[in-house]
Amino acid sequence: MDEEQGADEVSESLRTCIASGRQQPKIGMVRFVIGPDDRPVPDLEEKLPGRGLWLSAERHMVHTACEKNLFAKRARCRVDVDSDLPTRLTNLMARRCIRWVELARRAGQAVGGFDEVRRRLVDSRGGILLSACDGAADGREKLARMAGGRPVLDALSATELGIAFGRERVVHALVSRGGLSDNLNRDLMRLSGLRQDGAVA
């Protein structure tokens, strides 16, 4: 790859947040398009047709864009923004993360429960450690220490992790490295930003 090609690829991965005006990698952003009903539609797959409007995956940025209707300003057309858009976006992202964990479990790439996760960590198997945001602090801290340099993500609640494993609650889980974990990692980071105030929608 020559320098010019590398610069082009970096440029293509940057998007401008309609709330902050900052350019940043789209990996930490959410794309919207204006739907046929003149309302902003979260495009989490980034595949919907139409001009993309990008927002940083941060709760206060989403609220700012909705309160000031920055979608209309950037789209240069009428846009009707529902007051529940920030909550709806957060719920969509949470369901997306749950689905990734569920797919990983079905593929044999995810385990849940303190003892099973601890065994995997002792065996030095790589992956992403998931720790429920409402789990007991002592168990979370113990596994976090065992994880060493592995990512520890806590954007989901024990109930949400439980859904992915077909249980009532799961506090600890480990997802092996691979395509599913890459997608999960990105979406959990975005969900964490959308839940910056600690609210679990």
Image (cartoon, helix red, strand yellow):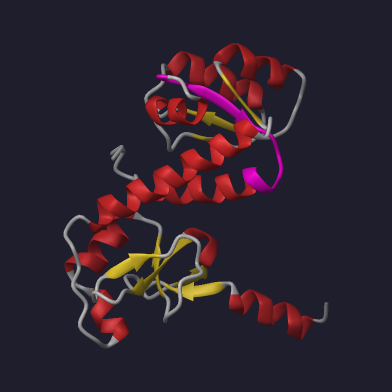
Q: Nearer the viewer, residue 156 or 19?
A: 156
Q: Which residues are magenta?
A: 168-181
In the image, farthest residue toward the top: 115
Residue placed most toward the observer, 173 or 101 = 101
- Along the horizontal axis of the image, is 121 left or right of 26? right
Q: Is residue 115 a member of the stretch shown in magenta?
A: no
Is 55 located above or below residue 136 in the figure? below
Please provide percent x and percent y for residue 97: 48, 43
Whether 134 is drawn above or below 150: the answer is above
In the rendered view of the protein, which quadrant contains the N terminus? bottom right
| Residue closest to the eye, 175 or 137 | 175
Q: Is residue 27 above or below residue 131?
A: below
Decide: is 18 above or below 166: below
Q: Would residue 192 be visible to someone looking at this image?
A: no
**Which corner quadrant holds the C terminus?**
top left
Residue 57, image x and y in percent?
Answer: 40, 57
Q: Describe residue 85's horizontal placement relative to residue 13 as left or right.
A: left
Name the residue at 52% across, 66% down: 26
- Please name whichever residue, 166 or 27, is drawn nearer the observer in this view of the structure: 166
Q: Which residue is outermost to the right?
A: 1
Residue depicted at 41% across the width and 31% down the height: 160
Total marks placed: 0
- Report the residue at 24% width, 76% height from top: 38
Query: Which residue corresponds to the image point at 22% horizontal and 66% vertical from the top-left?
Result: 66
Q: Determine the image quadrant of residue 29.
A: bottom left
**Horizontal and vertical percent position of residue 135:** 41, 21
Residue 173 magenta-drawn?
yes
Relative horizontal placement of residue 165, taking residue 68 as reference (left or right): right
Q: Is residue 157 visible?
A: yes
Q: Position of residue 153 (x, y in %)?
A: 51, 36
